[in-house]
């Protein structure tokens, strides 16, 4: 497995992994699946200082992906980024997520950011543990700020200073 910057040809695999979580879990807060246009727009937004990366196997199959995004739009937040990590359901627990998150943290530091924030749905213990294993600390919980599949969802906020 290796981690590299996402390319346009990775889009369909990224969309498939993402849409599986939209429809089959509460691990993200989207309720509408990405279209090809959504996927292309997402890839276009994740270049330069806010990159997207993929984990690929020896045959270039996408095992998972992650990205850095603006934390908030106001100028004072410009040195903070938010990470997102998604791993194909069949590839979990094999170090894919940790490799992706490690690369995102490295890139955030390389691009001069001061801190990385993660916002994880409250019951996603695997993602919380992943972030903690990469040096993130829990800094707060937002109670019942989302609703998906008929359930209220908390968000755990984690942060890593760079």
Image: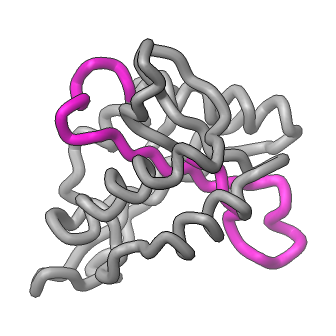
Query: How many numbered marks have been drawn onto this rendered protein structure?
Result: 0
Task: Answer yes or no: is residue 139 visible.
Answer: no
Q: Position of residue 22 (x, y in %)?
A: 27, 69
The answer to whether residue 75 is magenta is yes
Q: Position of residue 80 (x, y in %)?
A: 74, 54
| Residue lying furthest left | 150
Q: Position of residue 151 (x, y in %)?
A: 12, 81
Residue in view at x 63 percent, y 27 percent: 4
Quarter in which the N terminus is drawn: top left
| In this view, 134 is above or below 159 | above
Residue in view at x 87 percent, y 69 percent: 76
Residue 26 appears left or right of 133: left
Task: Answer yes or no: is residue 155 visible.
Answer: yes
**Quadrant hosting residue 161:** top right
The answer to whether residue 29 is magenta is no
| In this view, 123 is above or below 94 | below
- Residue toward you, 89 or 26: 89
- Residue toward you, 156 or 43: 43
Q: Position of residue 90 (x, y in %)?
A: 18, 34
Q: Which residues are magenta?
A: 67-96
Residue in view at x 24 percent, y 59 percent: 20
Quarter in which the C terminus is drawn: top right
Residue 152 appears left or right of 17: left
Residue in view at x 47 percent, y 24 percent: 60
- Residue toward you, 134 or 38: 38
């Amino acid at each position: 497995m290796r981690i590299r910057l996402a390319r346009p040809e990775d889009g369909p695999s990224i969309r498939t992994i993402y849409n599986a979580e939209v429809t089959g879990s509460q691990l993200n807060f989207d309720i509408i699946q990405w279209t090809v246009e959504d996927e292309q727009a997402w890839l276009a937004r994740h270049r330069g200082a806010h990159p997207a990366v993929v984990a690929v196997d020896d045959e270039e199959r996408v095992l998972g992906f992650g990205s850095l995004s603006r934390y908030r739009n106001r100028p004072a937040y410009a040195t903070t980024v938010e990470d997102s990590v998604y791993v194909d359901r069949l590839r979990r627990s094999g170090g894919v997520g940790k490799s992706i998150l490690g690369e995102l943290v490295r890139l955030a530091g390389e691009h001069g950011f001061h801190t990385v924030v993660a916002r994880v749905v409250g019951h996603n213990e695997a993602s919380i543990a992943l972030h903690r294993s990469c040096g993130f600390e829990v800094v707060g919980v937002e109670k019942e700020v989302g609703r998906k599949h008929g359930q209220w969802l908390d968000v755990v906020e984690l942060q890593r200073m760079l």
